[in-house]
Image (spheres, helix red, strand yellow):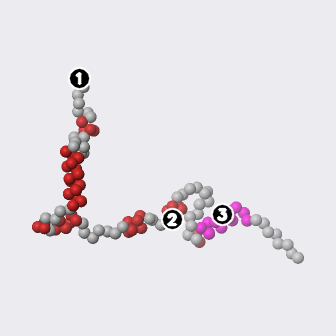
């Protein structure tokens, strides 16, 4: 019986084999093992899936009222919002006018 002298493969041959398998299976060859973020980059993007989940409005209420001003259509949600703002302002709780807020008046007071 003949004995075949079998020696384990060298590190260089294993590196070449890893490089070839990476090329064959379309993977990234990373001999040093540093973190590259390639796992995250290979994943599918979820943004288009999320945006496609919600239906797009065909036409908006504002567009209808602008197209047909002779009908004098009223957007009840917008009217309720404006009424709420008016009620808050009447009580002094509304948002300040532009340039009248706390930050705009901080540096204007003169010290005596």
* 33 relative to 76 in the view: left or right: right
* 54 relative to 92 in the view: left or right: right
Residue visible at 21% across and 61% down in the picture: 76
- Residue 80 in percent (x, y) is at 22, 56
* 96 relative to 41 in the view: left or right: left
Mark identifier at residue 73:
none
Whole-Å distance between the Cαs marked 2 and 3? 23 Å
Q: Are marks 2 and 1 in contact (CB under 8 Å)?
A: no
Residue 59 is inside the magenta segment: no
* Of residues 55 and 31, the one drawn nearer to the viewer in this rendering: 55
* Of residues 31 and 59, the one drawn nearer to the viewer in this rendering: 59
Name the magenta segment's main secondary structure.
helix
- Residue 81 in percent (x, y) is at 23, 55
Residue at the disc numbered 3 = 15
Query: What range of the chain is rendered magenta?
Result: 9-22
Residue at the disc numbered 2 = 42
Give the number of the mark in front: 2 or 3: 2
Assign the C terminus to one quadrant of the image: top left
Residue 18 is inside the magenta segment: yes
For numbered disc 2, what is the local secondary structure? Answer: helix
Q: Earlier in the sequence, mark 2 or mark 1?
A: 2
| Labels in figure, total | 3
């Amino acid at each position: 019986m003949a004995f075949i002298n079998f020696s384990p493969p060298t590190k260089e041959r294993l590196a070449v084999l890893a490089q070839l398998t990476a090329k064959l299976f379309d993977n990234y060859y990373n001999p040093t093992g540093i973190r590259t973020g390639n796992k995250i980059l290979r994943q599918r993007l979820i943004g288009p899936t999320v945006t496609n989940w919600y239906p797009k409005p065909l036409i908006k209420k504002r567009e209808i009222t602008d197209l047909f001003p002779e009908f004098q259509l009223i957007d009840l949600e917008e009217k309720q919002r404006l009424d709420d703002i008016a009620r808050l302002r009447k009580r002094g709780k509304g948002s300040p006018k532009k340039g009248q807020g706390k930050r705009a008046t901080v540096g204007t007071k003169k010290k005596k």
